[in-house]
Image (spheres, helix red, strand yellow):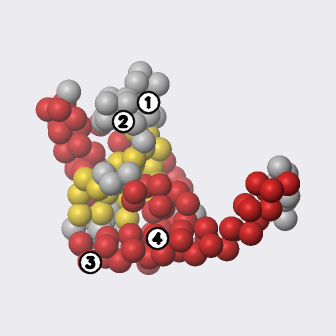
């Protein structure tokens, strides 16, 4: 499986970099390529692009790339994430999976990861009163 995984990763890198040569980093998350992979696993992959490029990625080109990645990995489906365009919680899940498979700009990747963890910590701090109240009362309120 290890050599097969390496071959698939090379195909994934080629497809991504052919579409987005400015890519700063690429991450895997989820069960694909791990001991937890099952026949129901899909490919979860996240791409870190420079901010100006990330803002202008169109849904059609993203879908096309997602389908190409699924094909390259011999999977039915690939979930492709534009890291600069998703919420803090998902960003944190991706980077704490600790599966960065490629990096062209270590400084940009480390800055993004540090900012993500800082924002996540701030979010947890801001939600603490709500969480404590829900634990105490057994009810969650909606804003």
Q: What secondary structure is found at the residue carrying circle 3?
A: helix
Name the one closer to the observer, 127 or 143. Answer: 127
Which residue occupies the foreground of this view, 95 or 121? 121
Report which residue position mark 1 lands on. 41
Q: Is residue 106 left or right of residue 19?
A: left
Residue 119 pos. (x, y %): 53, 74
Identify the residue under disc 2. Answer: 32
Disc with the residue nearer the chain's start (3 vs 4): 3
Q: Distance between the residues labelled 2 and 1?
A: 6 Å
Label 3 with label 4: CB-CB less than 8 Å: no
Residue 79 image point, x, y percent = 47, 44
Q: Where is residue 108 in the image (x, y as percent from the top left)?
A: 31, 76
User: What residue lies at 35% left-to-right and 42% top-to-bottom?
Assistant: 69
Residue 42's place in the image compared with 106, above or below, is above
Which secondary structure, mark 4?
helix
Badge 2 or badge 1: first in the primary sequence: 2
Q: Nearer the viewer, mark 4 or mark 1?
A: 4
Residue in view at x 44 percent, y 34 percent: 42
Callouts 2 and 1 close, C-beta under 8 Å: yes
- Disc 2 to disc 3, how far (Cα)? 27 Å
| Camera-side mark, 3 or 4 | 4
Q: Mark 4 points at which residue?
A: 116
State the CA–CA distance, disc 4 to disc 1. Answer: 26 Å
Q: In this view, does 21 lie above or below 37?
A: below
From the viewer's side, name the closer residue of 60 and 119. Answer: 119
User: In whole angstroms, how far apart are the C-alphas of marks 1 and 3?
Assistant: 32 Å
How packed is label 3: few (under 14 Cα within 10 Å), some, or many (20 or more)?
Answer: few
- Of tags 4 and 2, which is closer to the observer? 4
What residue sits right under mark 3 in the picture? 107
Q: Is residue 60 left or right of residue 109?
A: right
- Residue with the most extreme front position: 136
Q: Quadrant of residue 83?
A: bottom left
């Amino acid at each position: 499986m290890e050599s097969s995984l390496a071959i698939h990763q090379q195909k994934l890198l080629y497809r991504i970099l052919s579409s987005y040569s400015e890519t700063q980093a690429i991450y895997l998350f989820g069960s694909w390529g791990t001991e937890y992979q099952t026949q129901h696993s899909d490919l979860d992959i996240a791409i870190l692009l420079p901010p100006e490029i990330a803002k202008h990625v169109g849904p059609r080109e993203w879908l096309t790339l997602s389908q190409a990645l699924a094909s390259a990995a011999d999977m039915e489906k690939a979930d492709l994430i534009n890291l600069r365009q998703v919420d803090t919680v998902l960003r944190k899940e991706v980077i704490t999976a600790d599966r960065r498979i490629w990096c062209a700009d270590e400084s940009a990747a480390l800055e993004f990861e540090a900012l993500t963890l800082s924002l996540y910590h701030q979010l947890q701090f801001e939600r603490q009163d709500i969480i404590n109240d829900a634990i105490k009362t057994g009810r969650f309120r909606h804003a």
